[in-house]
Image: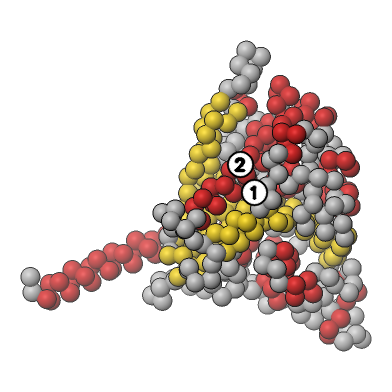
């Protein structure tokens, strides 16, 4: 075959590859402001790191799990293979000729049977390259597992997940079956399955990260240095996963047949679930305290460092409850960032345009008093500092957490030197926040 034909065929194949790769970026415009992008007033650590970001969707199955939805007096141990969909972000090699853009798919709604919130598919863009090759040079990378709310989805917090991957973390977000926007069902499934989902995914990621596993993540995952980030009901999940066992009263209502006892404080079977690979947690607007899920004795089981992120006007997981958990987590080296006048959605991506004419869906994303891009940037900053200190062992990040002033406004007194402003925040930008710290 003449060389010119070989050259033309190569060009066609190359063009086909490029079209396939960037097809997911069809909704993207080069000047678009996407979830996770930094505003001019973003604090120092909010900016993305030096790594390119790849993303892949995985489907995994946790075999032989209790099917709590089919439990009955005559069927007390129904079992099933529990499916989970994952989104994985990772440091990646980005070819120069390809835009670092992907499309994420989600649905609006609160389960399949809510006429007030019908399931409505939508998509939005993000700054990652789908199916990119992983960057093996900087690994293995610490692991971060993200657990969403009820309902929620694995792509609700892409502003944070992409950001962390760009800083040298493997980040995996779980679609918790029976708890997503599209499939939300009985609450007992969420109460029972969060901890088991998280631990199963930790084991899956560790196995995939083993050298010689045949996975695209082989050699890249440092599962011995894992952090958990949980939003709302995910906050309940990550606290329970690391030792905050539930009360006997919660067992009575949390799932039929007393099946939640497996997660009860003091139960040897529960205590055997504790995984030493988990080194830190970030509960964001954690749900549970207001419903009596924990008592002070049960909270003593948490010994890993924690960073609470809350709003003092939270109407879903009241601030008083989150503050009580923070204060009584006495064996954890813990921080708490408080957004004054903040509600429940501080960490969520900015509301997608499809919600602008759907009030109930809009408020599922949008803060009433804060701009979500601003709160996203602040959270990116503090989570970067917390994980840098506790997963990467870089003590210098502690300077961004151990602040001179509890109230950000106090640090922004212009009669003081700039060094007295909250570290990493620009002049005029450190307002409306609090940072608390309690040692174990």
Mark identifier at residue 300: none
Q: Secondary structure at mark 1?
A: strand
Give the tally of numbered discs. Answer: 2
Decide if residue 400 is in sight here: no
Circles 2 and 1: CB distance less than 8 Å? Answer: yes
Q: Quadrant of residue 257?
A: top right
Q: Residue furthest left?
A: 1
Question: What residue lies at 27% left-to-right and 69% top-to-bottom?
Answer: 14
In front: label 2 or label 1: 2
Q: Position of residue 135 (x, y in %)?
A: 48, 68
Q: Earlier in the sequence, mark 2 or mark 1?
A: 1
Residue topped by disc 2: 197
Quick check: 102 left or right of 422?
Answer: left
Q: Position of residue 313 (x, y in %)?
A: 83, 53
Question: What residue lies at 48% left-to-right and 68% top-to-bottom?
Answer: 136
* Quarter of the image that includes the C terminus: bottom right
Viewer-nearest residue: 286 or 352? 286
Question: What residue lies at 82% left-to-right and 54% top-to-bottom?
Answer: 332
**In the rendered view, would you say 224 is above or below 66?**
below
Residue topped by disc 1: 147
Q: Residues within 10 Å of mark 2 (few under 14, many from 20)?
A: many
**In the rendered view, would you say 398 is above or below 338?**
below
Question: What residue lies at 80% left-to-right and 81% top-to-bottom?
Answer: 427
Q: Position of residue 178 (x, y in %)?
A: 60, 36
**In the rendered view, would you say 33 is above or below 206?**
below
Q: Position of residue 51 (x, y in %)?
A: 54, 72
Viewer-nearest residue: 368 or 164? 164
Q: Residues within 10 Å of mark 1 (few under 14, many from 20)?
A: many
Give me the C-alpha separation between circle 2 and circle 1: 9 Å
Q: Quadrant of residue 49?
A: bottom right
């Amino acid at each position: 075959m003449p060389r010119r034909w070989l050259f033309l065929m190569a060009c066609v194949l190359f063009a086909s590859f490029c079209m396939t790769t960037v097809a997911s970026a069809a909704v993207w415009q080069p000047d678009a402001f996407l979830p996770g992008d930094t505003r001019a007033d973003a604090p120092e650590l909010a900016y993305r790191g030096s790594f390119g970001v790849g993303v892949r969707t995985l489907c995994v199955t946790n075999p032989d799990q209790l099917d709590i939805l089919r439990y009955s007096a005559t069927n007390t141990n129904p079992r099933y293979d529990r499916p989970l969909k994952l989104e994985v972000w990772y440091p990646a090699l980005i070819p120069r000729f390809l835009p670092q853009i992907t499309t994420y798919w989600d649905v609006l709604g609160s389960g399949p049977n809510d006429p007030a919130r019908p399931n409505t598919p939508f998509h939005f863009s993000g700054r990652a390259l789908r199916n990119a090759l992983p960057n093996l040079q900087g690994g293995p990378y610490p692991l971060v597992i993200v657990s969403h709310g009820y309902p929620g989805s694995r792509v609700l917090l892409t502003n944070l997940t992409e950001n962390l991957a760009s800083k040298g973390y493997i980040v995996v977000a779980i679609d918790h079956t029976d708890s997503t926007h599209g499939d939300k069902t009985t609450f007992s499934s969420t109460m029972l399955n969060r901890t088991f989902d998280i631990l199963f995914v930790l084991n899956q990621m560790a196995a995939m990260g083993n050298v010689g596993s045949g996975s695209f993540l082989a050699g890249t995952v440092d599962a011995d240095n894992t952090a958990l980030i949980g939003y709302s009901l995910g906050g309940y999940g990550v606290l329970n996963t690391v030792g905050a066992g539930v009360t006997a009263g919660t067992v009575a209502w949390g799932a039929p047949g007393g099946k939640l006892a497996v997660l009860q404080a003091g139960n040897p079977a529960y205590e055997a679930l504790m995984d030493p690979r988990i080194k830190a947690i970030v509960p964001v607007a954690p749900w549970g305290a207001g419903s009596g899920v924990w008592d002070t004795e049960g909270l003593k089981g948490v010994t890993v460092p924690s960073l609470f992120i809350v709003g003092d006007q939270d109407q879903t997981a009241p601030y008083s409850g989150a503050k009580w958990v923070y204060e009584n987590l006495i064996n954890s080296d813990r921080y708490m960032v408080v957004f004054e006048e903040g509600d429940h959605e501080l960490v969520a991506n900015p509301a997608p345009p499809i919600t602008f004419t759907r009030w109930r869906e809009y408020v599922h994303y949008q803060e009433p008093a804060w701009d979500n891009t601003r709160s996203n940037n602040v959270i990116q900053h503090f989570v970067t500092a917390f994980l840098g200190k506790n997963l990467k062992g870089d003590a210098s990040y502690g300077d961004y957490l151990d602040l001179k002033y509890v109230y950000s406004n106090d640090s922004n007194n212009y009669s003081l030197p700039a060094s007295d402003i909250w570290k990493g925040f620009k002049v005029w930008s450190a307002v409306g926040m609090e940072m608390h710290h309690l040692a174990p």
